[in-house]
Amino acid sequence: MPRLETGSRFPALSIPAVGGGHITLPDDLAGSFGVVLVYRGSWCPYCNAQLASFSRHYDKLVELGAKVVAFSVDDEPAAAELAAKHKLRFPVGHSADGPVIAAATGAHLNDEPRYLHSTGFVLDPDGSVLTAVYANGPIGRLVAEDVIGFLRYVEGRAA
């Protein structure tokens, strides 16, 4: 499956959101920098650490004009429990269709059990990919501090 390259338009996706409604990408991030975090599942300790870190750094990301969303193939109860456990301050999606997401984004899909490997995207305000990080195992993912530094760099280049 082809990966999304820098400059490519992020594909249109709709993922059910914890608590109701949908996360509609890239539309829900339009006009802001976007951070899209695809996580393996609530059972993954690395994903838990990543999501908790993005929540802790959320105010800095918002100051830089960024919106964050995360999703996985977890069912709603598992995703809701994860969001509550880490007091996640951004929308969390659940029940993502793994094969559809993999085909649209190039994320690696694990077959048994079925889940998406960690994949992260930073989008510019028009929905184009600024950078993408793909993992095909438990480690290798976007780090909140790196995203903050990257957004500061991008803003500085534009000034």
Image (cartoon, helix red, strand yellow):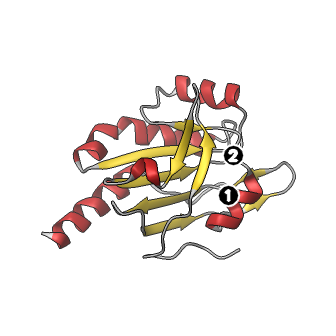
Q: Is residue 136 visible?
A: no
The residue sitting at 71% across, 44% down in the picture is 73
Q: Position of residue 147 (x, y in %)?
A: 36, 57
Say few, some or many: other residues with alpha carbon within 10 Å of mark 2 (under 14 / 14 to 19 / 20 or more).
many
Q: Is residue 19 visible?
A: yes
Using the image as rendered, state which of residue 12 and residue 87 is in the foreground.
12
Query: CA separation, marks 1 and 2?
Result: 7 Å
Q: Identify the residue at the far left of this view.
A: 159
Disc 1, SS: helix
Q: Position of residue 142 (x, y in %)?
A: 47, 57
Cβ–Cβ below 8 Å for labels 1 and 2?
A: yes
Using the image as rendered, state which of residue 144 and residue 25 is in the foreground.
25
Say few, some or many: other residues with alpha carbon within 10 Å of mark 1 (under 14 / 14 to 19 / 20 or more).
many
Does label 1 or label 2 sit earlier along the sequence? Answer: 2
Residue designated by label 2? 96
Using the image as rendered, state which of residue 27 and residue 147 is in the foreground.
27
Q: Say left or right for 37 vs 94.
A: left
Residue designated by label 1? 101
Q: Position of residue 128 (x, y in %)?
A: 42, 68
Residue type, mark 2 in image: Ala
Q: Quadrant of the C terminus?
A: bottom left
Disc 2, SS: loop
